[in-house]
Image (cartoon, rainbow, N blue to C red):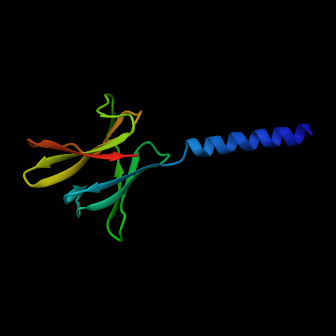
Amino acid sequence: MRTKIALALGLVALVAFVSAQAAERVHADIPFPFIVGKQTFPAGQYQIVKGDKEDLIQIQSMKKGPAADILVITRLGSEIHTTPNDSHIVFDKVGDAYYLSELWLPGEDGYLLHVTKEQHTHRTVNSPR
């Protein structure tokens, strides 16, 4: 009986651990073309995934289309959330070009994905959970 209880508790702990390590997914409708690295993505619906690796973010078109892995430059220590349930995707706008720059998830520090040295403005796309 003790073995069954220990096995059940171990299984519960394993499920909790795997759930905690599960990927954080953000779905966003981005209304303009944008650039990730050297690749241009068309306007459309995207899934952005923060997996269990803290230094890698993935972006994938919800339709058959472009995808990319993005290395995280650093974490950003202040929160810009308008509500605790929204994710925010920040783009640096240089001229007519938008560069994927930051990802903010509820309850977490942000992820810096790109640094723009030129004079630029920001455009934010909110993604409710």
- x and y, in percent, of residue 61 in the image: 34, 63
Q: Quadrant of residue 122?
A: top left
Q: Nearer the viewer, residue 123 or 39?
A: 123
Q: Residue at x 36, y 71 (%)?
A: 64
Taking 47 as reference, is 73 above or below it? above
Q: Going by the image, does 44 lie left or right of 56?
A: left
In this figure, what is the number of numbered marks?
Answer: 0
In the picture, which quadrant includes the N terminus?
A: top right
What is the residue that sits farthest to the right in this orientation?
A: 1
Decide which of 78, 82 is in the foreground and name it. Answer: 82
Q: Quadrant of residue 33?
A: bottom left
Front-most of residues 68 and 125:
125
Name the residue rendered at 81%, 43% in the picture: 7
What residue is drawn where x is 55% and y is 44%? 21
Give the image location of residue 121, x and y in percent: 12, 42
Left or right, residue 124 beside residue 83: left
